[in-house]
Image (cartoon, rainbow, N blue to C red):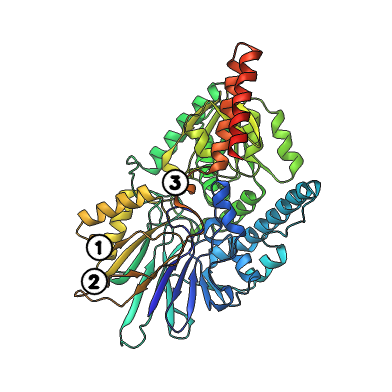
Amino acid sequence: MTTLSFYGAAGTVTGSCSLLDTGSTRGLVDCGLFQGNRTVRALNAQPFPFDAGRAAFLLLTHAHTDHTGLVPKLVKEGFEGPIYATRATIDLLDFMLLDSARIQESDARRANRRRERRGEKPLPPLYTQDDARAAIARLKPVEYETWVEVAPGVQARFWNAGHMLGSASVEVKFPEAGTGNTMRLLFSGDLGPEEKVFHPEPDAEQGFDYIVCESTYGDRDRDDYTLAARREALRKELAAGLERGGNIVIPAFAVERSQELLHDIGALLAEGALPKATVYLDSPLASKVTEVFARHAAHLEDMELAPDALFRDPAFRVTQDVEDSKAIKKVERGAIIISASGMADAGRVVHHLRNNIWRKECTILFVGYQAPGTLGSIIRSGKPEVSIRGEAYKVRAAIRGIGNYSAHADRGELLSWIAERMPVVGGVFLNHGDDDARAAMRRDLAAMGVDAETIFLPQFDESFDLTAGTPETKGRATSTGQGTPRIAPDAIETDWHNDYAAFVLALGTVMSDEGSDGRRRAILAALTETLETAR
């Protein structure tokens, strides 16, 4: 019996990890880091819900951290098989995994200093640079649209996914034990939109037993746009932000999003379409990725700039060390600051938000998806005050957003991609999306004629028995039941840490607005009584 298990990105958009057990071998598709609120991020430190040493191979759809960020931990916990990915993905992972390991080591040192002060034992990092090097040594390049045997009897083929440099949908086929049938599955990975600078539209063959498809934007359609129209929308936002007289802070992922922004801003500057400004790329990882894109420039599509001019405008400042980053704090106006992370919950962008979010002449411009519970999501929700690193900040800056820089296909594009892969005999699994997006996409697929009973919305750690389906049986999968999931569904969007931060901010506002110390003391007394009752 073939079993497919979902150990991440089920009801959320991070931590992608699927385990395929053919009955004779086991393999993984992606092994990503969980991102979001603290409860979601805590999943990274938990043991894998499977034996890492029993997996024979790993297939990576692309280099983004939510698909690759736990690969060094997988190796640390006993994985010894080959890791297959496209050449461009490997080029990126050569330094992305080491960068991630350095962050893990740094975070562990900082956390252990706090633990030492509390008299607690130190904890090891999630993984080390040595673990990352061991993972990199296992990377094996594959070409698009070329079959490769990844385990005895198991073949895989990578198709362009149009999401980012090197991204792929992965087709897997193998003989189904005892039936004489061949099982064919297609894992979409993350799919790019039809209009995307640098990359062609997603592609793959037709006719599968099962498809596993992402659903990040399964419940929303972007406005129709062209790359020129998108660049014009960016121009308007940047021009308006600079006219306000302050800085513009753009939280952006280091891989792909930062490079798209630099390309479009460079094109606008070359046209004289923007006021004078200095553009800072403040992310060591993003600067390294930018160098990779520049090397691959001759193979990229839809560029307005010549390859030798890509990312090299004299107005660009690419910062490397911490002192260069700190120096940006002294700039009070006329700066466009692009910095990671894209969801504003870590990295150098946090410092730029602290320096600018309270200034009414500044602008915070979001250009991508903000996972529930992240600082970016909270800022975008319109809260008048937010907590950044435990300190309250009034939100006086203009909060703006451009949706068309997303690297994900929207609702219509996802549905079209699935329709073009038909017929699907067994069923469609919708992952890498929140429950609302997946439910909406399920309704739309059913309206297209897909049998609703063959559309599955897997939950955390849920496993399904698969058959090489026929039109008569429709290959209806049955959950094997895996007990209690590692995280409660209601903690995926927001958790008690978010509730606590919101409570502290609200309490501070109430105490500040109260007119007398007597009332303030009465409020604290009532809260203290509630706490005593709860103990």
Amino acid under label 3? Ser
Counting from the top left corner in percent of width and height, residue 26 is at 48, 78
Q: Residues within 10 Å of mark 2 (few under 14, many from 20)?
A: some
Q: Which mark is residue 453?
A: 1
Of the two numbered discs 3 and 2 in the rendering, the one whose residue sits closer to the viewer = 2
Q: Where is 503 relative to 480, above or below?
A: above
SS type, badge 3: loop
The residue located at (53%, 56%) in the rendering is 66
The residue located at (59%, 62%) in the rendering is 70
Q: Mark 3 and 2 residues: CB-CB less than 8 Å, in contact?
A: no
Amino acid under label 1? Glu
SS type, badge 2: loop
Q: Give the CA distance from mark 1 to mark 3.
A: 31 Å
Closer to the chain start, of discs 1 and 3, is: 3
* Furthest residue in direction front, as rendered: 533
Q: Where is 515 relative to 207, above or below?
A: above
Q: Which residue is mark 3?
A: 406
In this rendered view, identify the residue nearer to me: 101 or 402: 101
